[in-house]
Amino acid sequence: QVQLVESGGGLVQAGGSLRLSCAASGSIFSSKAMAWYRQAPGKQRELVASITAGGSTNYDDSVKGRFTISRDNAKSTVYLQMNSLKPEDTAVYYCYRPWGNSWGQGTQVTVSS
């Protein structure tokens, strides 16, 4: 059973940057798609970005041009580089692997204005 562990969240001022990491263990990583979701208070969880096994990426319109998803298969880790952060990016960010419907525990990102 895969375990996904996120790290890198925190408090940052608007316009700042953070990089989230998600380390996967327990199963093959390189051949599986990965994704980042987020959930703000009182809102539904939403897809932020995804990356296929081959490295193709997809982004929600709200983060295009600001966020970058990437993966390091040698480290079984997926990243989310977040630049030009806005207060509306404040949420708990979750790592997700569709194969096996596996979720991480989440990491809080708070952007102050």
Image (cartoon, rainbow, N blue to C red):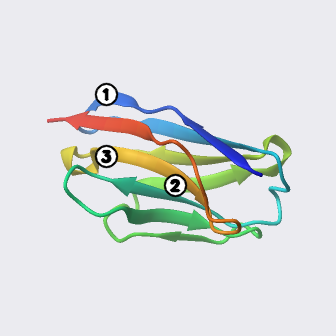
Of tags 3 and 1, which is closer to the observer?
3
- Residue lying farthest to the front in this orientation: 1
> In this rendering, is residue 33 above or below 87?
below
Q: Give the x, y percent position of residue 106.
A: 47, 42
Q: Disc 2 and disc 3: Cα gap in Å?
A: 17 Å
Residue 33 in which image quadrant = bottom right
Is the C terminus in the top left, top right, bottom left or bottom right quadrant? top left
Mark 2 falls on what kind of element? strand
**Callout 1 crowding tier (Cα within 10 Å): few <14, some 14–19, many ≥20:** some
Q: Which of marks 3 and 1 is nearer the N terminus?
A: 1
Residue 71 appears left or right of 89: right
Residue located 26% across and 51% down the image: 40
Q: Mark 3 points at which residue?
A: 91
Disc on res. 74: none
> In this rendering, is residue 50 above or below 83?
below
Q: Do the residues labelled 2 and 3 touch (CB within 8 Å)?
A: no
Q: Is residue 84 visible?
A: no
Q: Give the x, y percent position of residue 21.
A: 59, 39
Q: Name the residue under label 2.
A: 68
- Residue lying farthest to the left in this orientation: 113
Disc on res. 11: 1
